[in-house]
Image (cartoon, rainbow, N blue to C red):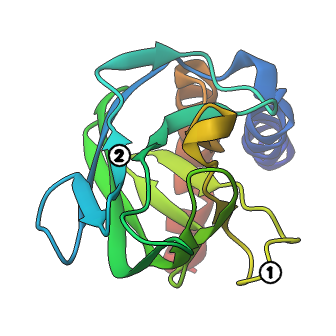
Amino acid sequence: MKVSRRFTAVLGVAAALALPAASQAQVTYSTTGVFTSSGTNVVSSNGMTITYEALGSTTVFPTPSGIHFGDFMTSGTPATTGGSPFSTGFTLNVFQTAPSGGSGAFAGAVSGTLFSNGSQAFWVPTGPLSFNAGISTYTLFTQSATPAGAGYTLVPPSQGGQTTLQGYVVTPEPSSMALLGTGLVGLVPMIRRKKQK
């Protein structure tokens, strides 16, 4: 009887951990973003503007290929020769509503000079590149070759002006969690038996 219970418990835990990532649960999330200097999703300098376009409620099946966190959009023309200098913080907030509620943020700094015909402005995260929201883990992709550090080079207006923030999310599939719970319940009799000895 002891061998049977232990075998069942171990088998349940192993099966839960072995399920492929492709069977993850759907995730529903949205984003917002705020520039420190303006307190809004828009910041301007010397004729150039950077706008963060948030992501409304979005439902995805998590995959290794990545998800979308919103876009930086650049517009305008520098008021003087050379470009428009930016130096401000930017925080990207992510809010998950399913499969469980939770939120987290990626914080960083926007710096450099943004030109209308060429970009030297960057957003470089200064905090962790992953956080947990409920039972999900969100991770931000960055470009390691960015001169200012691992982050994003902002695309100038003449090249479309759109810089997409990307990453991925990992969420356990509900049946995996149930299977794991079943395996752990099988351990309870063994623990009780040990305490009685």
Most foreground residue, 186 or 196: 186
Sequence-wise, which precedes: disc 2 or disc 1?
A: 2
Q: Which of 145 and 169 is in front in this view?
A: 145
**What amino acid does circle 1 point to?**
Pro
Numbered badge on residue 52: 2
Residue at 36%, 29% in the rendered image: 55
Q: Which quarter of the image is occupied by the N terminus?
A: top right
Q: Residue 22 carries which label?
A: none
User: Residue 105's image quarter?
Assistant: bottom left
- Position of residue 159 relative to residue 99, above or below, is below
Residue 157, given in percent of the width and then of the height, sits at: 55, 40
The quadrant holding residue 158 is top right
- For image coordinates 81% across by 33% down, the residue present is 64
Closest to the observer: 186 or 117?
A: 117
Q: Where is residue 155 in the image (x, y as percent from the top left)?
A: 64, 48
Say few, some or many: other residues with alpha carbon within 10 Å of mark 2 (under 14 / 14 to 19 / 20 or more): many
Q: Can residue 126 be seen in this view?
A: yes
Task: Measuring from the top left, give residue 112's x and y in whole percent.
Answer: 55, 80
Residue on which disc 1 sits? 147
The answer to whether residue 187 is left or right of residue 144 is left
